[in-house]
Amino acid sequence: MGLVLCLASAAGFGAMAIFGKLAYSAGVSAGALLLVRFTLAAMLLAIVLLARPGLRRVKPDPQAAAAGRPSASRVRVLAIAIGLGAVGYALQASLFFAALQRMDASLLSLILYTYPILVTVAAVLLGRDRFTPARGVALAAASSGTLLVLLGAGRMSFDPLGALLGFGAALVYVTYILVSDTIVDRLSPVLLSTLVMAGAAGTLAVRAGLTGGVDLSFGPAGWFWLACIAIVSTVAAMLAFFAGLKRTGPSTAAILSTFEPVVTTALAALILRESLTTLQLIGGALVLASVAVLQTRRPGHRRQHDMQAECGAPGGHVVRVRTP
């Protein structure tokens, strides 16, 4: 059941780019898509919190307690969580869906999926993690795979600005992950996700107000695809991931998450008639293999991270980023 839930979650996240393309075809603007997605998701998650009061607790910082330092206040932790959505996730999603307007969903999904490698590099540089031979191999494989993905695009179908926006989304995601890593032990995944969604919705609402609002006059088809993005690719995918995480542990869940760009590529081929070249498929396989290598831990480490996951503190970086 844990494997099924993790794969279902990856499928939900992977379908988001396809739903986005279909929403654009139905006349939905990027601004309307983002605002409706985050607002509806925040409302649905808030309902979950109302139904489950135990998920609303803010825990003390275990590291601070072990070091004899006072924990950050509840207000400060909540403010950081809202700020993650208001600044980090709102910007990341804006870059992603702006890139989606300019390039194929399958190619964008592979570019975005470089973020696990970027997180590992950043964590090593910041002293939060250590460099190992396995991580070196993963970094080399991911770098080579990304290069093949870009080189295989060809001059006619390659959009430099779209690729730049996609990499920008990945880089912003890395910053978001590293900041969220400082509070993830304090909040339940559902509470953190709700605050992130609410923060992003607030930023996008302010932006809409300052730019003259968003056009919501599109037809039922547009609203249907927006509902799919908010319900299937945001709330349901997130809840399924954490339910699967509890049963499988973070290492297995993170490896299964590599199914996400595979789903995007397959759906793009079936629904949008997109296709990747052989060179791009090889590059994508290298990128996904590097993520799997990153998440393969020694038995002792896996047990420690599994225990953290059971306490609501996912241990792997890829696990953490699935919060919103």
Image (tube, helix red, strand yellow):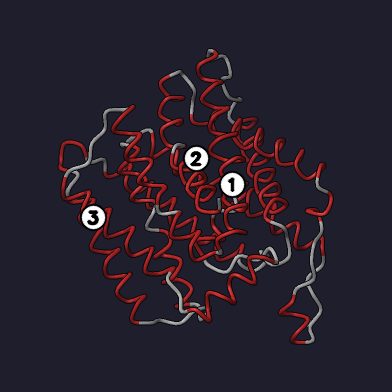
Residue 78 placement (x, y as % from top left): 76, 57
Residue 182 placement (x, y as % from top left): 64, 69
Name which residue lies at 49% across and 78% down: 299
Residue type beneath disc 1:
Ala
Which callout, 1 or 3, points at the residue further toward the start of the chain?
A: 1
Classify 49 as above or below 29: below
Q: Secondary structure at mark 2?
A: helix
* Mark 1, other Cα within 10 Å: few <14 / some 14–19 / many ≥20: some
Classify 114 as above or below 202: below
Classify 137 as above or below 280: below
Residue type beneath disc 3:
Gly
* Mark 2, other Cα within 10 Å: few <14 / some 14–19 / many ≥20: many
- Tell us which disc is closer to us: 2 or 3: 2
Name which residue lies at 52% across and 45% down: 9
Judging by the rendered image, the residue that carries numbered circle 2 is 12
Label disc, if present, on residue 284 of the rendered structure: none
* Side (left or right) of 20 relative to 235: left
Judging by the rendered image, the residue that carries numbered circle 1 is 240
Dividing the picture into quadrants, the one containing residue 156 is top left
Which callout, 1 or 2, points at the residue further toward the start of the chain?
A: 2
Judging by the rendered image, the residue that carries numbered circle 3 is 283
Residue type beneath disc 2:
Gly
